[in-house]
Amino acid sequence: MGLLPLLLRGAPKRFLRASGSYRSLYESNSRRRRHGTDAAAADQAVNSRADHRPDDQMLDFPGAKAAFTSRMEFISPNAAEAVPCFRILDDLGRALDGSDIPEVDSSLAVKMYHTMVRLQTFDSIFYEAQRQGRISFYLTNIGEEALNVASAAALTKDDVVFPQYREHGVLMWRGFTLDEFANQCFSNEAGHGKGRQMPIHYGSEKLNYFTISSPIATQLPHAVGAAYGLKMDRKNACAVTYFGDGGSSEGDFHAACNFAAVLEAPVLFVCRNNGYAISTPACEQYKGDGIVVRGRGYGMTSIRVDGNDALAVFKAVSAARKLAVEQSKPVLIEAMTYRVGHHSTSDDSTKYRSGEEIAHWRSVRDPVLRFRRWLESNAWWSVEDEKELRGAARKEVISAMNQAEKKNKPPLSELFTDVYDTLPRNLLEQEATLRDTVSKNPPSLAPH
Amino acid sequence: MAAAAMAQKVLVPCSSSSSCGKVQFSPSRVHTQAIAFGGELSQSSSRKNKSLALKAVAGETSAPVTAKSGHEILLFDALREGLEEEMARDPTVCVMGEDVGHYGGSYKVTKGLAEKFGDLRVLDTPICENSFTGMGIGAAMTGLRTVVEGMNMGFLLLAYNQISNNAGMLHYTSGGQFKIPVVIRGPGGVGKQLGAEHSQRLESYFQSVPGLQMVACSTPYNAKGLMKAAIRSDNPVILYEHVLLYNLKERIPDEEYVLCLEEAELVRPGKDITILTYSRMRHFVLQAAKTLVERGYDPEIIDIRSLKPFDLFTIGNSIKKTHKVLIVEECMRTGGIGASLRAAIVDNFWDFLDGRPECLSSQDVPTPYAATLEDATVVQPAQIIVKVEQMLQGLI
């Protein structure tokens, strides 16, 4: 090593002709080139290096630290086996042999189940409401209830959530009430968003759930930024962000993952690989082994988990959170699941997948039912409980819907507020002109 | 809508390739209404004896046209027809975007094309707008004619880098060696409660980029003609469709026609005031015109169609006649097409104006979702009526 600094200080080119590696070493330090007295020392350094056996020579390019090989071997596009998927319960809700059940007591488990059922009920009723024209748009979480709720249950209230749009269960777990959900969907004046966003674009500063923005994957860099802030403040919290298999194709995914790894930001990237991005199936979205393998590409810890197994999700997210917060490192979690519903009310997925496939995943592979079976096996849940909960949930959701529908829409005074912190001159003018127009125009000339 | 859109003859673009700086008319290209209008202007004395205009929209052509000629079509289908014809005519034309292939496109503009031309020429891409726009540009530079579809224009903001730095620039920076015959299209504008991110007016943001051409369609007739012209153009063209106009129905010619990218469309000839508009606002202006005509006004309505460059020839001729101009647009007040058009009018036609050029635009706010708020954000026909009356009564 003593001679290496001499080499690094640079030497005239004629002494460093041996091979490409030396040349690049020299070139990278060319601005520190010296002549004359170092030449002999450099010569000696080259010769002593050449004394080493080829196998002992280590790659010391700035870009990587690896051993050399004389066999040209391309890395195949996919490993011999796909990354295995972690699960605790089988499809029938029975604990697999040798599995390590996480600490989920009856009250936590029942609370999780309550939330899943409430989410499922809310989704089906509001989807129908859109079909009846009571709201203009809706998007369901059907098939991903376990992933939503179990991942949320593994987090704390201080962890900041950056959702895509199919994570209503996370918000529901945190305490967003059915009224609050309904108010947002009906864009009435009681909604936190002041009627400014489409239905399901929830947001709650109080619950650390950042307002949903439709464009795909834009929330991923946001999460990294938030994590960076948490790290700076040394908070016992991490950022958590959700996205789908389609979202992983966006440039923002790459940028966010790379940044999180390089900057060592405490952020959890939770990919809901539900098999479809509107009509694009996963096999047309990527050619690699899903999203989990990319973690290694970024130098990020990663895991693949059965997203329809509430216990596995709970355990994996808990462990990931611990790693992120304690070691300030990002973690990539690929949760395999299935999008049972259509992409949204603007989509009819029977156009690109069979009704049988949908029916199978809706019934036999329902994650809520699977969890329920596990609860029942522990004698924490019964048929009567089920009937009571389903009835109560339905009533509560319908009541929230009816209440929200009756409320007024936001007044025109809320059209110009919050664009900035205070109203600038041009907006004051526009508001004045608008009020003038509205007051002068009889209803018959009002727009359709 | 306008049955007068039926041309008698085949229309051809004014130049076969890149934009002409000045629009050149040939007799076959002018709508028959324009011919009628040209005749009246030469007889100024007839103006007093002329009865009030009765129709808000341009009327039927005088030449006999059987009811069966042409075919009725919805706007999205007209776009599809234009695209299909160009793909059949030229094997280098291909489409790329999200869900354009087997799904047929989110607004069905590419329906059936993947089955007909194969899924390589109608390519489903993963979700990465910057990437597939860049891909389209690269393919165009190496000999293909790509049509890039943004599922919503707003998503093309992700591709702004590619569109501005590459599509707009490379022909220039390469010294003319590489051309980029790409068409970037998709639905934009304020829809019905689609939320702020899906209600962007990208023409506002892109109008400044040198090297790009921009056109906005508003009827099935001009949609098909502009689609074909855009594909044949060697320049990068952005074709703005409006999310709420896809189901507009009109009878269009059976025979092939291609419109001129740089030309504005005279929708309704008039004498009192020039109203310049485009896209969805054209239909709001026509709606307002019904009331205005009832009240005895005679507005001249021009659908500018070409957002970059402006057809100052058509616009100027109109202003020279009416001396008053109102722009009705969906862009926001700050920095929109209206702002630029006003500047261009003041620069070029100052001497012909009786008063300042007026402009009705959307509010400078992100488009809110709640219906009442959203309606208040964009211009409504009632406002157009009030404004025109104020201008014609000399109140402003």
Image (cartoon, rainbow, N blue to C red):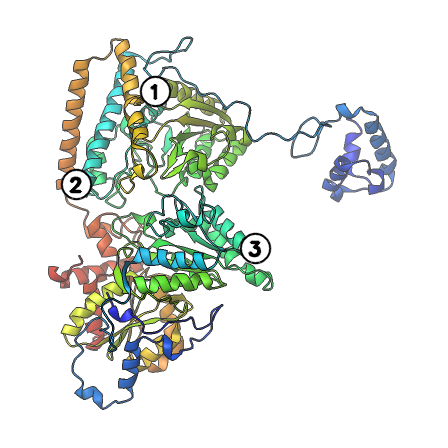
In the picture, which quadrant includes the N terminus of chain A? Answer: top right
Specify the label residue A310 is tagged with: 1
| Distance Cα–Cα, label 1 vs label 2 | 33 Å
- Of all residues shown, which one is farthest toward the bottom? B45
Residue drawn at 18 percent across, 58 percent down: A447
Q: Chain of mark 1?
A: A
Per the rendering, the mark at residue B152 is: none
Q: Amino acid at mark 3?
A: Thr
- Tell whether label 3 touches label 1 (CB within 8 Å): no
x, y percent for residue A356: 30, 29
Q: Is residue A52 visible?
A: yes
Task: Please tell me whether mark 3 sits on a helix, a strand or a loop.
Answer: loop
Q: Nearer the viewer, mark 3 or mark 2?
A: 3
Quarter of the picture holding the C terminus of chain A: bottom left
Q: Amino acid at mark 1?
A: Ala
Camera-nearest residue between A70 and A216: A70
For mark 2, does the 10 Å Cα neighbourhood hold few (<14), some (14 to 19), or many (20 or more) residues?
A: few
| Circle 2 SS class | loop
Say which residue label 2 marks. A132
Chain letter for the residue marked with disc 2 in the picture: A
**B225, A124: nearer the viewer:** B225
Which residue is painted at 14% across and 61% down in the image?
A439
Q: Would you call the spot at circle 1 few (<14 residues within 10 Å), some (14-19), or many (20 or more)?
A: many
**Circle 3 residue:** B142
- Residue A23 horizontal side relative to residue B198, left or right: right
Q: Looking at the image, is B81 positioned above or below residue A361?
A: below
